[in-house]
Image (cartoon, rainbow, N blue to C red):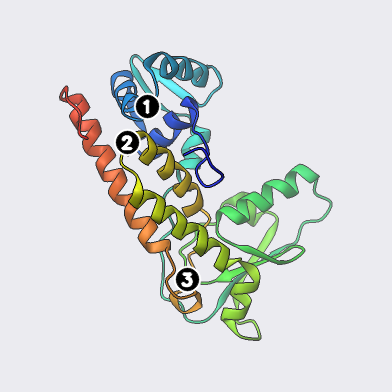
Amino acid sequence: MDSPLVPPVSARSAVLSLLLGAQPPTLNVREIVGAMGLFGISESATRVALTRMVAGGDLLRHESAYTLSERLLRRQEQVEPPARRRWSGSWEMAVVTTTGRAAADRVALRTEMTRHRIAELREGVWTRPANLVHHWPDRLREVSTFFEARPDGEPAELAARLWNLDAWATRGQAYLDALAAVHDEPTRFVTMVAAVHHLQTDPLLPTELLPAHWPGERLATIYADYRAWLAAMREDLRAGGFAR
């Protein structure tokens, strides 16, 4: 499915997706090659990708096993959504208090805030409903002040202004439809990779702020089931067979 909804997946991206979904994120070469074969990627392409990824610092190799580098271990945290807490109506606010930062630092901060599912209300002011359990990294605390407040106005209207919820829901439903329609493993894999990228941008808002028929929970459930299938498939590969 080579389309804007499901772009093609390179051997490198396929290996990363496999390891990012693994707990722990370490697999031996036989497991990786076997899984890539199920996903339609040849052994030669897989081995070339592994060599380049070790050379590029994406993976660490110990004997025949490969694991994510420390840099990508941090990226794996994005795969796991933060825990939720009961929403009392308050919103988290992050106000950037450090001035004179370099452009690269501003881009990094924007990326980090987005990773924590916080939207920019205005320049230097970020917010979201206080329904997630966050562990703010020191690099954010060094440049920002965090607190909770109750903004004026209708919360649902503010949420709709901060996130394009209708567009997210439409694309999320498209992934649900695409996953329901696949009949072969390579297509299911590349569709799931694209769906997971979309799932990582779910704002994880309280239910009362979401449009009707929000597809986020269904998409997350399908991904959890797929990860369980991957785990079973890896065990089957270790035993010398394939779980299809």
Q: Mark 3 and mark 1: span between their CA atoms?
A: 40 Å
Dot 2 or dot 3: first in sequence order is 3
Figure check: 25 above or below 49: below
Q: Mark 2 and mark 3: span between their CA atoms?
A: 36 Å
Task: Give left or right: position of 190 versus 108.
Answer: left
Residue 239 is situated, as x and y percent measured from the top left of the image, at 15, 25
Q: Secondary structure at mark 2?
A: helix
Task: Give left or right: position of 136 versus 178.
Answer: right
What residue is shown at x 56% (from left), y 45% (from top)? 4
Residues tagged 1 and 2 counted as in contact (Cβ below 8 A)? yes
What residue is shown at x 41% (from left), y 13% (from top)? 44
- Please name the residue that numbered disc 1 is placed on: 40
Figure check: 90 above or below 175: below
Name the mark on residue 185: 2
Q: Which amino acid does the dot numbered 2 rest on?
A: Glu
Residues tagged 2 and 3 counted as in contact (Cβ below 8 A)? no
Name the mark on residue 131: 3
Q: Mark 1 and mark 2: span between their CA atoms?
A: 8 Å
